[in-house]
Amino acid sequence: MKKIFWGFCLFVLGFSNSSFGQAVKSGEKLVYAGSYNMSGLMTQLAQVTMSTETVSTSKNAYLHLSCELSTYSKWDSFFKIRDIYESYVNPANLKPSLYKRSIDEGGYTKKEKYAFKGNTVNSTTKRKNKPETQKKFTIGASTQDVISLLYKVRTLDFSKFKVGQTQNLMIVFDEKQIPVTLKFMGKETVNAGNLGKKECYKLSISAKTDALKGKDKNLIWLTADANKIPALLKFSIPVGTGQLTLTSASGI
């Protein structure tokens, strides 16, 4: 159950015609406390760290987007999680070239790699005690991996959105394209860790999957400024509810 929960914790974190803007820059680091509803109480179980850095090869420069999730040590004996999600994107438009996912959840391990070339993805997957598999499949021109899409969303100009306005998106996850709809729900002020109280854009996320439950139950708050930092996320899935709360932001 916890494996499903934290997988979709990152799925929710991971949400046009926008272009790369000042909302995303190299050297940014965001740290979150991940909580799960246990017996009616929201209990902090894990830390999620998102970071960006510039990396270069002999031919190209990329923006490396990283998301790491680790349960706090006191919970490791209950259900230990060590997950890393990475995306290497074009700094000019945030289109992914390479996506990597390494999960270690309660003894279950899986390593996944997507190499993007145009509308084609070559994937390699290795699960615990199973042989490596490879697959080639086609995606839409605007489809992105779960990590790069979150940063792409932060380049949207929500100041021009009207309450109830929607934006259709597409992600690729577990070798499948999943349609996602983002709905603008107005503004609210929330706590944003070391940034203090911040006015935020409130957004509802829905997807064509059975894993997300309830209408307007999966929510994200982005600071209503040039950075559009995800300050708070709440979500509802078949195994329970939870949230991610920003504790610190640096390099913004």
Image (tube, rainbow, N blue to C red):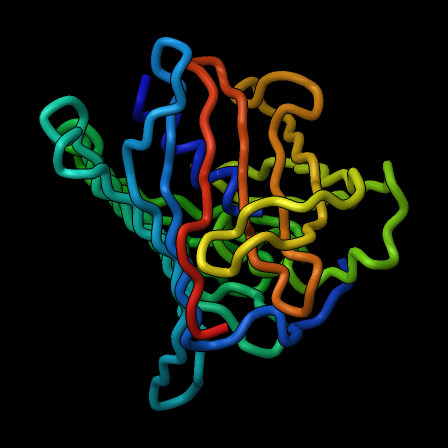
Residue 57's quadrant in the figure? bottom left
| Quarter of the image where the N terminus is located | top left
Residue 9's quadrant in the figure? top left
Is 10 rendered above or below residue 236?
below
Is 58 rendered above or below residue 222?
below
Is 225 rendered above or below residue 181?
below
Q: Is residue 78 left or right of residue 239?
A: left
In this view, the residue farthest toward the top is: 39
Residue 245 rendering spot, x and y as whole percentages? 46, 42
Residue 127 rendering spot, x and y as whole percentages? 21, 35
Q: Is residue 54 left or right of residue 45?
A: right
Residue 214 rendering spot, x and y as whole percentages? 64, 17
Residue 63 rendering spot, x and y as whole percentages? 45, 74
Residue at the (54%, 39%) spot, across then down: 233
In this view, the residue farthest toward the front is: 196
Residue at the (53%, 56%) spot, across then down: 196
- Residue 105 is at least partly visible in this image: yes
Residue at the (9%, 26%) spot, across then down: 77
Q: Along the line of sight, which residue is nearer the eye, 123 or 21?
A: 21
